[in-house]
Each structure stands twice: as structure tokens, then as C-alpha cells.
Image (cartoon, helix red, strand yellow):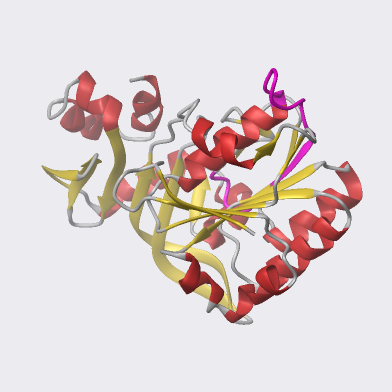
Amino acid sequence: MNKFKEVLNCFPENIISEIMQNINQPIAEITEEIRIRNNKPIVLKISQEKLILKHIINSEEIEKIFMKICENSIYSYQKQISEGFITIKGGHRIGLTGSAVVENNKIINLNYISSLNFRIAREKKGCSINVLNEIINTDKNHIYNTLIISPPGCGKTTILRDIIRNLSNGIPSKISSKTIGLVDERCEIAAMYKGVPQNDVGQMTDVITNCSKSVGMKMLIRSMAPQIIACDEIGSKDDVQAINSAICSGIKGIFTLHGNNIDEIKKNPELSELFSKNLIEKIIILSETCKGKIEKIYTI
């Protein structure tokens, strides 16, 4: 309930009252999203169901909510706003839409905010045990370079976070504590808030946020000497080149990727170098129907 209350604190009293009148504590514990749209009703995503409330949100309410999540300083959150999200205390991520301000083909701001999607952050410690058993090489006290693949919403980011935490802290009789460099481009894994990780990513993890994965990987390698590099949702040629540079320098890597199967991934020209140079040693496909379950494992 505490995580849910952290998100509720972003809303005016009348909206908090409306939400709490329609749900109880057990429902609050499994609520994943609260969506706010201008001139539309509030929608709560509860597991696979949607609860549509009666209250119709107006422009003034959206403005109040937006200013509150920006702590009345839009300028301080300009970079995140231009990326389409804001991370607040507690690690909760708020997606934004509105009228884009474009300069040199890049979005530099959003005006007239029209929708807000509050994604309630919840850690699931221990969810990565099955995956960890596959990627740890206990004989050599290191991990296999690993790619975790699944469609969106199947738990790969949650699993990656738990993998990082475990490897950073070390697992008795399996692997010693490792120094990890985490590129958290969109603040979904560590959920940094004013320089403090809101999620537990372990005692030996260094995090860089708000930059591209390729730039972040290169910076971490230069400045923090990681034993393991980790990042979520790779996909560009620049990402692959940075991974190549890291692995050729003796750094191990754990990465995730959107996809349905290995054949689909291999057809992606941006990712071909991962396979042609054998940069990846283990590929783990997660189930599309059972969140967090391993569907298939490939050893390269």
C-alpha cells in the first residue's frame, strides 16, 4: 500500500478520494497504473483488468498534477519531459503526452500536457533465481554474456533489476560480489531520484541515467572500471558497437531486448554483429503468457 500511496500523493484531494472510494487495500497492492487523460475518466490498470472511474479529469487538474510532480520547477525536469517521462521519489515513472516542441528534429519540450500515465514501481526480489542459475558460471566465478528476450510487459526489466542486485551483492557458494555499471537510460531499473536509486540495485552498482545506452556504456568503462555492464532494451547499431567494445575489453554483459523469438532477432540488421562476432554466450527467451518464466535457452 505504501507504494500506491506515494503515487496518490501526486493528486489533488478530490481525486485521491475518488480513487480510494473505488478500491480497497488488496486491490491497491496489485494496481499497476493510473492513467489520467484530459476530459476523460480516470483509468486504473489492475493486473489484466481496467477499472474506469466516474470522475472526468479537466485541464486545471492536469496542470496541478503536472506541477506537483515537477515540484513546481518545470525547468529542473526539462530533460526528462523532453524524453516523455518523469521519475518521482519511490521510483515511480510517469509517462507524458502533449504538444511537442521540436527543434532540429528533436523534441525539446512538451506543452499542453494531455495525458499522464503513473506506473507504480514495485520490486520483486528473488524473481531472477531461475535466470541466474543459467547465466552464472560457478567454476570461473563469472557470468556468461547474456541476452534476455521477451515481448513488452513480460517481466524482463524486473528480472534484470533483480539480477543486477544479486550479482552486485554476491551470492554465497555461487558467485562473489561484482562491480556493475548500469546504464539506466529511462530511469526504469534503478529509478534514480536526485542521485539516489529508489530501487535496490546492490551495493557495488554504479548507475548512469538520462543518456543513450551507447554513450553510457563507454563512459562507465572509462570512469568506473566495471566487471559487468548491464542495460535494458538494446536495439541500435551504436548499442551493439558499444557492447562489442566492452566485451572485447574483458567486461561481461547482461542486456535485454524486445522480441518474440531468436529467429526474429537474428533478422534485425542492427543486431547482426552480436551474432556474427559471437558476442553473446547465452540467450534466454521469456514466456509471453507467464510473466518471468523461461521459455527457451540457447547456449552459443
Residue drawn at (33%, 35%), measured in percent from left and top?
A: 11
Residue 162, horizontal then vertical, whole percent: 56, 33
Report which quarter residue 215 is drawn in. bottom right
Is 187 in the magenta?
Answer: yes
Residue drawn at (33%, 20%), measured in percent from left and top?
A: 1
- Whether residue 201 is visible, yes or no, is no
**Residue sitting nearer the eye, 101 or 199:** 199
Report which quarter residue 14 is drawn in. top left
**Residue sitting nearer the eye, 21 or 12:** 21
Left or right, 203 with respect to 245, comes to: left
Is 179 in the magenta?
Answer: yes
Provide the major secondary structure of the magenta segment.
Answer: loop
Residue 283, horizontal then vertical, whole percent: 57, 55
**Residue sitting nearer the eye, 71 or 293:** 293
Left or right, 292 with respect to 187, comes to: left
Residue 296, horizontal then vertical, whole percent: 45, 52
Residue 263, horizontal then vertical, whole percent: 48, 72
- The C terminus, quarter of image: bottom right
- Please give the range of residues in magenta: 169-188
